[in-house]
Image (tube, rainbow, N blue to C red):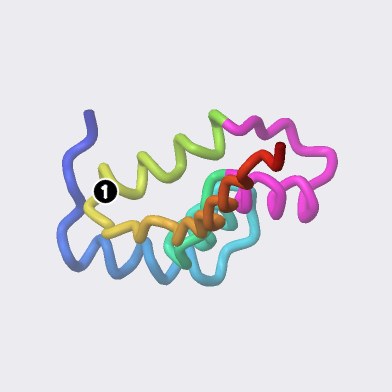
Amino acid sequence: MKAKLTPAARKERLALIQKGQSISLLSMRLFLAGKSVDEVFTAVKKAFPKGQSTRSSTAWYKSELKRMGFKVPEPIRIVPPKAKARKAVA
């Protein structure tokens, strides 16, 4: 398991993530913006249609960010309200 990055190394890595153009850097940038695994995977497939990314490899980048010491926000989940049960009319 990799050790957490020092604050200076984390700052350098964040600068690279913000300007780089690769599957890994795009994935990390979107995770840091609060996107879910599905949203990131869709964006990666759109940006790199010939890439061989999978959902699990995309999720790995989120884990890697956490291992490096970044605070990765969890995506906001919108739960639809439950429909009211209708009474049966006899």
Magenta stretch, residue numbers: 38-55
Q: How many labels does the image show?
A: 1
Residue 49, relative to residue 31: is it above or below? Answer: above
Magenta segment, prevailing SS (helix, strand or loop): helix
Indicate the position of residue 15 as horizontal and vertical percent values: 42, 71
Res 74 quadrant in image: bottom left
Residue at position x 50%, y 54% in the image: 79
Q: Where is residue 69 in the image (x, y as percent from the top left)?
A: 22, 53
Task: Say whether residue 80 is left or right of residue 32.
Answer: right
Q: Nearer the viewer, residue 7 or 90?
A: 90
User: Residue at position x 80%, y 52% from top?
Assistant: 46
Where is 58 relative to 42, above or below?
above
- The residue beneath circle 1 is 68
Front residue of 34/32: it is 34
Q: Is 49 placed left or right of 11 in the picture?
A: right
Specify whether residue 83 is painted magenta.
no
